Image (cartoon, rainbow, N blue to C red):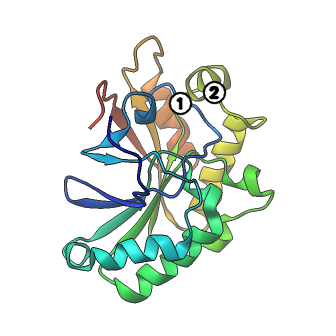
């Protein structure tokens, strides 16, 4: 087991990712956090789940040379990044100013508007370049079995969030994970739903042993 440390910034195949929190409003059956503690040696379980914008920015600064060689950075870790919305906004503003070469993407479960009780997409517009949202299934029952959401009407909230991102002209992709053991989904129906909401669609492979 890799020792816990506050890896807010980590690299997967040299691509930079930001691990904002371990808190999440889902417990997806395919999530890497239930398979192992680390991604290519970086333990993503935080000592204290208290990421600040300053703490993340310090790690960005410490890796400036590596970041300058990349073209995208992704908010994605062992938790739902938009739980830390204010920090994500502050960090994104810093990245836009100091690393104009980096496109900003957020990988999210799509619960943010329900979490915050408002349309937070308006705060992301013009700040992030793309967003990937976990649609996960073709219907509510299948979604609940896969995602184990902690919010009410989660599946409908996800679809509304996808549409909200599309309406604000953010490059939006709805994703599913295919071939999850004991949790089959109808990938074709999921693609139809994604496109009906105006989003792109991506079917990701299940990774049984993590990265």
Q: Position of residue 146 (x, y in %)?
A: 55, 24
- Seen at 54% across and 28% down, the residue is 137
Residue, disc 2: 148
- For the residues marked 1 and 2, what is the alpha-carbon distance in whole angstroms? 6 Å
- The relative height of residue 146 versus residue 122 in the rendered view (above or below) is above
The residue positioned 61% from the left and 36% from the top of the image is 26
Q: Is residue 175 left or right of residue 122?
A: left
Label annotation for residue 68: none
Helix or strand or loop: what does disc 1 sit on? loop
Instruction: Report whether residue 25 is seen.
Output: yes
Contact, mark 1 vs mark 2 (Cβ under 8 Å): yes
Farthest bottom residue?
Answer: 97
User: Which residue is the extreme one toward the front?
Assistant: 3
Q: Residue at x 50, y 25 (%)?
A: 29
Above or below, 53 against 199 in this view is: below
Horizontally, is 199 left or right of 163 in the view?
left
Whether residue 159 is situated above or below residue 54 in the rendered picture: above
Q: Position of residue 121 (x, y in %)?
A: 64, 65
Of marks 1 and 2, which one's residue comes earlier in the chain?
1
Q: Residues within 10 Å of mark 2 (few under 14, many from 20)?
A: some
Residue on which disc 1 sits: 28
Front-lying residue, 127 or 208: 208
User: Measured along the vertical axis of the image, is residue 136 above or below residue 126?
Assistant: above
Front-most of residues 67 and 144: 67
Please state if 153 lies on the left or on the right of 53 as rendered. right
Given the current orientation, which residue lies at the most extreme top position? Answer: 182
Figure quadrant of the N terminus: top left
Residue 59, position as x, y percentages in the image: 37, 71
Which residue shows up at 55% across the image and 63% down it? Answer: 51
Per the image, label 2 sits on a secondary structure element best described as loop
Q: Position of residue 118 (x, y in %)?
A: 78, 61
């Amino acid at each position: 087991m890799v020792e816990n440390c506050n890896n807010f910034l980590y690299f997967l195949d040299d691509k930079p990712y930001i691990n904002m929190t371990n808190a999440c409003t889902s417990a997806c059956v395919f999530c890497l956090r239930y398979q192992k503690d680390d991604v290519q040696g970086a333990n993503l379980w935080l000592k204290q789940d208290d990421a600040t914008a300053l703490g993340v920015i310090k790690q960005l600064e410490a890796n400036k040379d590596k970041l300058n060689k990349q073209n995208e950075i992704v908010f994605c870790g062992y938790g739902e990044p938009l739980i830390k919305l204010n920090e994500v906004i502050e960090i994104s503003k810093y990245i836009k100013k100091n690393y104009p070469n980096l496109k900003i993407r957020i990988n999210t479960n799509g619960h943010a508007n329900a979490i915050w009780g408002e349309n937070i997409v308006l705060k992301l517009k013009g700040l992030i370049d793309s967003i990937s949202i976990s649609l996960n299934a073709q219907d509510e029952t299948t979604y609940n079995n896969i995602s184990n959401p902690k919010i009410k009407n989660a599946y409908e909230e996800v679809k509304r969030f996808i549409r909200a991102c599309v309406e604000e002209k953010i490059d939006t992709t709805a994703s599913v994970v295919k071939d999850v053991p004991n949790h089959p989904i109808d990938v074709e129906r999921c693609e139809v739903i994604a496109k009906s909401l105006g989003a792109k669609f991506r079917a990701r492979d299940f990774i049984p042993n993590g990265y």
